[in-house]
Image (spheres, helix red, strand yellow):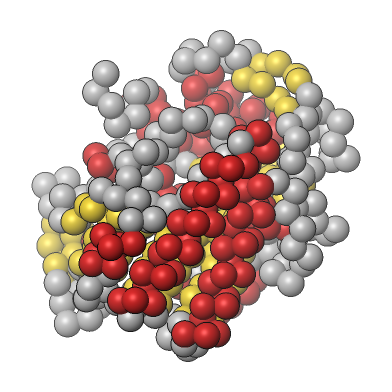
Amino acid sequence: MSSLLAEFDSDGLETGVMSETSKHYLVTGGAGYIGSQTVRLLVKEGHRVTVVDNLSTGHAEALPSEVNLVEASLVDGATITKSLEGVDAVLHFAANIEAGESVHDPARFWANNLNGTLSLLNSMHAAGVKKLVFSSTAAVYGEPKENPIAEDNDLLPTNPYGQSKLASEMAIHDYCHAYDMSAICLRYFNAAGAEPGGQHGADHHHKTHLITLCMEAALGRIPKLSIFGTDYPTRDGTAVRDYIHVVDLAAAHIDALRVLGEKGCRKYNLGNGLGYSVKEVVALAKEVTAVDFPTELTERREGDPAELIASSTRAQSQLQWKPAHAELRKILQDAWDWHSSHPNGYSAE
C-alpha cells in the first residue's frame, strides 16, 4: 500500500492525509456500488479524488466529504476534459450493468457503455492523461468451454452488456497502442456484500443481483424471490456463479494503480475461484437472515450462461492481489448488515 500519514476520524476509521506519494485520481461512476468503495479506499490512502457521476444510479451520500463531485455525463467532453486537469490516472466504473435488461434494451447499453468509454478516452487523450483502470466484466466470456475461466479463454459474450464491455476493452487496447497509454481491464465476476460494519453497500434502482434480491425478500420488500432456470447443466439445475466481496474488488483497483506504467493494455479476472448455484446462495441467505422467504421457479433469462467461475491466478501473481473476504457466508452477512440497517438504501424515507 502507498505510504501515508494517518489520523482517525470520529468513527475510528483510519483516514489518510496528503503525503509526498499522494496522487490525484478521477473516478467515473464513483458514486456507485463498487466505485464508492474504491473511492473510500483511495481517500484513506491519502489521495485526492475527483468523482464524475451523473447520479442516475449513484448516490452522493456514498462519498466521503473530502471528494470533489462533478455531476456530469461522460459524453460532456468539455467538462470531462477540464476535470482531468492535474489528474494522474482514471478509474472508469460508469456503465449500465444489468445483463438481462441489456437483451431487451440494447440501445441504452451501447450508448452509455461504449459511447461513454470512447468519450472518456478522447478526453483523456486531449488532457494528456495516460493511465486507466477499467471496470470490465466476466460477461465478455459468454458461455465458456471450461471453468475456472482464464483470461485467454474465447471472448464470445452472449448479451449486449458483455458485448459493449468487450468493445470498450478493444477501444482501450487501440488507444493504448496508438497514444502510448497504459491500461488495466479488470474483469469482475459477481460483486456482492457490503462494507463491514453496514455503513455502505448496494443501493441499486434496478435490483437484479441475486444476493440483493435475497436481502429484499428477507426484508419483505418483494413478495418472493424468482429463480430463473432450473434446467442448466449444473449440479442442481440452477446457474452457478463466482461471488466476490465488493471490498476485495475495490482493493484490486488500488493494486492495479500501483503497477500501471508501461505502455499497453492488460486484462485480469477478479473472482474467488469458487462457484455457488442459485439454490445454494438462496439456502445460505435464509440461514444468515433467519428468514425463510418464499421463492418461485421460473424460466431462464435470455443471455444467462450456465456457469461462470474465475481463475484469478494472474491477478494474484502480477497484481499481488488476494481476496480477504472469500467466504460466501461472510459476503452474505455483510450484505445483510447493510440492507437490514438501511432498508431504504441511502434514502432517509
Q: Nearer the viewer, residue 150 or 130?
A: 130
Q: Quadrant of residue 185?
A: bottom right
Task: Tell whether 160 sits left or right of 22.
Answer: right
Q: Quadrant of residue 273?
A: bottom right
Q: Quadrant of the N terminus?
A: bottom left
Q: Is residue 295 above or below residue 186?
A: above
Residue 181 in the figure: left or right of residue 90:
right
x%, y% of residue 274? 68, 52
Determine the residue positioned at 58% across, 42% down.
107
Q: Position of residue 28 (x, y in %)?
A: 36, 57
**Along the line of sight, which residue is nearer the eye, 249 or 10?**
249
Residue occupying the point 65% across, 52% down: 162
Rendered residue at 15%/77% (across/down): 19
Is residue 247 in sight in this rendering? no
* x, y percent for residue 318: 55, 79
Split into 4 quadrants, where in the image is the C terminus?
top left
Residue shown at 83%/33% (left/top)? 237
Q: Position of residue 295 (x, y in %)?
A: 66, 16
